[in-house]
Image: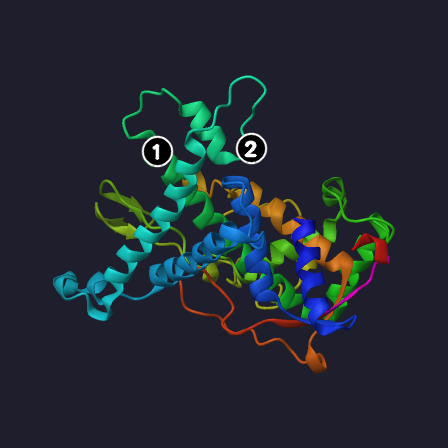
C-alpha cells in the first residue's frame, strides 16, 4: 500500500518540480483502494503498465457507473407499471454495466484457472485460493460462477466504500487543522520521523482511530443500510409490520440523531470516542447507534479489512506529508447522490514531504 502512495506522489512531483504538489485526492484514494483490492483478489495493479493498467481503468469506470446507477431514483421502483418503459434507460445501462463487470472478472478467473498449485507452487491471490479450494467440489452452482460472484462482491464492496471514507476523513481534517495537527503529533510520538508507519503501530494510534470512527459517524460510506424484507407479519413496538414490507435503515440520520449523540452531533469531534460514554463503541454492529458497516448476520463481511486499510492509508498519509488546501480555503463538503456517499466536488490538496528523504 505504501509503495503505491509513494509512486503516485513521485509521479506528481516529477511533473511539478516542487516540494509541494497539488494532488486530486479523490482520484488518488480511488486508485489506492482499487490497487489494494485488485492485488488481494486478482494479483493485479493499476499503473503497472500494459494490459493490467487498461483492465484496471476499465474496472474503475465500470464500478463508478455501478454505484451511481444503484443509487439513482428509478420511477419503476415507485410505479412498477412503468417498468416496461425503462424511463431514463437506467435498467438497460445497469444490465450493460453488470455484463462488463462480469466479463472483466471472468477474464481474471480464466487466466488463473489453469495454474497448478500442487507441490511448491502456492496460490498468490484470492482467486487462486478459491480455485484450489473448490477444485473438484460438488456445489449446487457452477464453481466459476461462485468464484466470479465472490470476487465481484469483494471488489464492489471494498473499493468505492474505502475511497469514500478516506476522502471524507481528509476533508474533515483539512477543515479542522488543530485535529490534523494533533493526529500528526500522535504519529510522531509513537512512530517518529526516522521510519515509516508499520502495521504494529496502529494499536497505539488511539486518536487516529477516533478520527476514523468520527468520520464514519458523520459520513458513513453507505448512508442507507441494505434492504431487508419481512418474511412474516410481526409487531415492532406499537407498529404492525406486514409480511413483504421492506426495511431500510437511514444510517446517516441515525448517526446524527441528537437523542443518541447529545454533544453537538453535527460537529466533527473525534474526542467523543475517547470519552467514557463512547470509548467502547466499535464498528462491529454491537452498538446500534453506530453501525457504519451494518449489524447482525448481514453485517458487511469486509468490515475488518476495510478498517485495517483505512487506518494504514490515513496513518501513512498524515505521517509522511504536510497537507493543506490552495490558499488555505475550506473544503467544500457537498455530498453526491448514489449508493455510496461520495463527495460531490474534487478534493485538491497540496502535499509536501515531512520525513527524511530516504524514506520516500
User: Which color scheme did the rendering employ for the protein?
Assistant: rainbow
What residue is shown at x 37% (from left), y 58% (from top)?
66
The one nearer the camera, 88 or 188, is 88
Q: Which residue is mark 1?
A: 144
Q: Is residue 66 above or below residue 108?
A: below
Task: Determine crowd level at label 1: few under 14, some 14-19, many 20+ residues with C-alpha closer than 10 A.
Answer: some
Q: Is residue 353 visible?
A: yes
Of residue 288 and residue 224, the one placed in the foreground of this image is: 224
The spot of residue 252 in percent (x, y) is 47, 61
| Residue 276 shows in this picture | no
Return the x and y of residue 50 as percentages of the image width and height: 53, 52
* Residue at (48% x, 55% y) in the render: 54
The residue under the point 69% across, 50% down is 3
The local secondary structure at tag 2 comes to loop
Give the alpha-carbon distance from disc 1 to disc 2, as whole Å. Answer: 18 Å
**Circle 1 sits in a helix, a strand or a loop, which is it?**
helix
**Residue 213 belongs to magenta span:** no
Q: Residue at x 57, y 41 (%)?
A: 304
Kindly identify which residue carries mark 2. Answer: 124
Q: Earlier in the sequence, mark 1 or mark 2?
A: 2
Q: Residue furthest bottom?
A: 327
Residue 36, position as x, y percentages in the image: 57, 47
* 346 over 319 or under it: above or below: below
Q: Is residue 256 above or below residue 349?
A: above
Give 87 or 77, whichever is nearer the viewer: 87
- The quarter holding residue 28 reads bottom right
What residue range appears in magenta?
351-356
**Dot 2 alpha-carbon crowd within 10 angstroms: few under 14, some 14 to 19, many 20 or more:** some
Quarter where residue 348 is shown: bottom right
Residue 221 in percent (x, y) is at 50, 57
Amino acid at each position: 500500500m505504501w509503495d503505491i502512495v509513494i509512486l503516485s506522489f513521485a509521479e506528481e512531483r516529477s511533473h511539478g518540480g516542487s516540494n509541494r504538489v497539488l494532488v486530486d485526492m479523490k482520484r488518488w484514494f480511488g486508485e489506492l483502494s482499487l490497487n489494494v483490492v485488485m492485488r488481494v483478489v486478482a494479483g493485479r495493479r493499476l499503473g503497472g503498465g500494459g494490459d493490467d493498467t487498461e483492465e484496471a481503468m476499465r474496472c474503475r469506470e465500470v464500478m463508478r457507473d455501478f454505484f451511481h446507477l444503484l443509487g439513482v431514483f428509478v420511477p419503476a421502483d415507485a410505479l412498477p407499471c412503468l417498468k416496461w418503459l425503462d424511463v431514463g434507460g437506467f435498467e438497460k445501462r445497469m444490465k450493460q454495466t453488470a455484463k462488463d463487470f462480469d466479463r472483466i472478472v471472468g477474464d481474471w478467473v480464466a487466466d488463473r484457472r489453469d495454474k497448478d498449485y500442487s507441490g511448491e507452487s502456492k496460490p498468490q491471490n484470492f482467486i487462486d485460493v478459491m480455485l484450489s479450494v473448490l477444485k473438484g467440489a460438488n456445489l449446487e452452482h457452477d464453481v466459476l460462477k461462485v468464484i466470479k460472484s465472490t470476487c465481484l462482491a469483494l471488489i464492489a464492496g471494498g473499493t468505492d466504500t474505502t475511497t469514500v471514507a478516506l476522502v471524507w476523513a481528509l476533508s474533515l481534517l483539512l477543515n479542522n487543522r488543530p485535529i490534523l495537527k494533533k493526529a500528526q503529533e500522535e504519529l510522531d510520538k509513537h512512530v517518529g520521523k526516522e521510519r515509516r508507519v508499520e502495521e504494529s503501530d496502529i494499536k497505539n494510534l488511539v486518536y487516529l482511530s477516533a478520527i476514523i470512527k468520527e468520520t464514519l459517524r458523520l459520513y458513513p460510506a453507505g448512508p442507507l443500510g441494505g434492504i431487508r424484507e419481512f418474511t412474516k407479519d410481526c409487531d415492532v413496538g406499537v407498529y404492525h409490520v406486514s409480511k413483504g414490507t421492506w426495511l431500510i435503515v437511514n444510517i446517516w440520520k441515525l448517526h446524527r440523531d441528537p437523542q443518541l449523540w447529545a454533544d453537538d452531533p453535527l460537529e466533527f469531534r473525534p474526542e467523543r470516542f475517547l470519552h467514557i460514554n463512547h470509548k467502547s463503541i466499535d464498528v462491529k454492529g454491537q452498538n446500534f447507534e453506530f453501525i457504519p458497516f451494518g449489524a447482525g448476520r448481514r453485517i458487511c463481511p469486509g468490515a475488518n479489512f476495510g478498517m485495517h486499510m483505512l487506518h494504514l492509508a490515513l496513518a501513512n498519509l498524515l505521517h509522511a506529508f504536510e497537507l493543506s488546501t490552495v490558499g488555505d480555503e475550506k473544503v467544500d463538503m457537498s455530498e453526491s447522490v448514489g449508493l455510496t456517499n461520495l463527495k460531490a466536488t474534487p478534493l485538491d490538496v497540496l502535499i509536501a514531504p515531512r520525513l527524511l528523504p530516504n524514506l520516500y
